[in-house]
Amino acid sequence: MPDQEFLFALDMSGEPPFDGMLAELARAVLGHVGCAHASIDALTGQLGAQLAARAGNGTRRCEVRFRARGRELEIVVAGAGRPEWRTTCPLPSP
């Protein structure tokens, strides 16, 4: 992937489960930016757990953001009055 910035955000509202849709979306974004297959599996699982923890509190709005900056992809899950969860994934060199 070229050294460029992008932001992809998804505002989730409604009843869970979002597992299937979120997993498919995460795999597509992570694969597009060139994350390793093992990283994709691990990150998809972490995302699902974080979203379930927020949606499970009865709050129906959560936000998932994927932001590429430099050689790193940052993933953020926010919502349900809980602290944001953040993680990063290194991006491969072009």
Image (tube, rainbow, N blue to C red):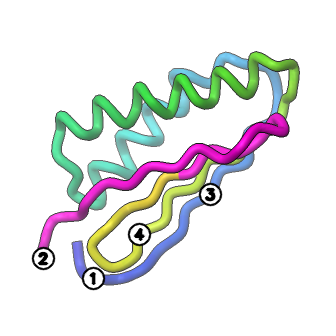
Q: Which residue is mark 1?
A: 3
> Which amino acid, by three-letter code, is at mark 3?
Ala
The residue segment tinted magenta is 76-94
In the rendered structure, which disc, 1 or 4, sits on the residue that comes first in sequence?
A: 1
Asked whether the residues under the numbered discs 2 and 1 touch, taking CB atoms below 8 Å apart as contact, a structural biologist would say yes
| Residue 62 shows in this picture | no
Q: What is the tally of numbered marks visible in this picture? A: 4
Identify whether 56 is placed above or below 88. above
Dot 3: what SS? strand
Task: Give the number of the mark in front: 4 or 3.
Answer: 4
**Amino acid type for the residue under numbered disc 4:** Ala
Residue at which label 2 appears: 94
Q: Secondary structure at mark 1?
A: loop
* Residue at the disc numbered 3: 9
Give the CA separation, mark 4 to mark 2. Answer: 14 Å
Q: Earlier in the sequence, mark 4 or mark 2?
A: 4
Circle on res. 68 = 4
Query: Where residue 22 sits: x, y (%)?
Result: 53, 33
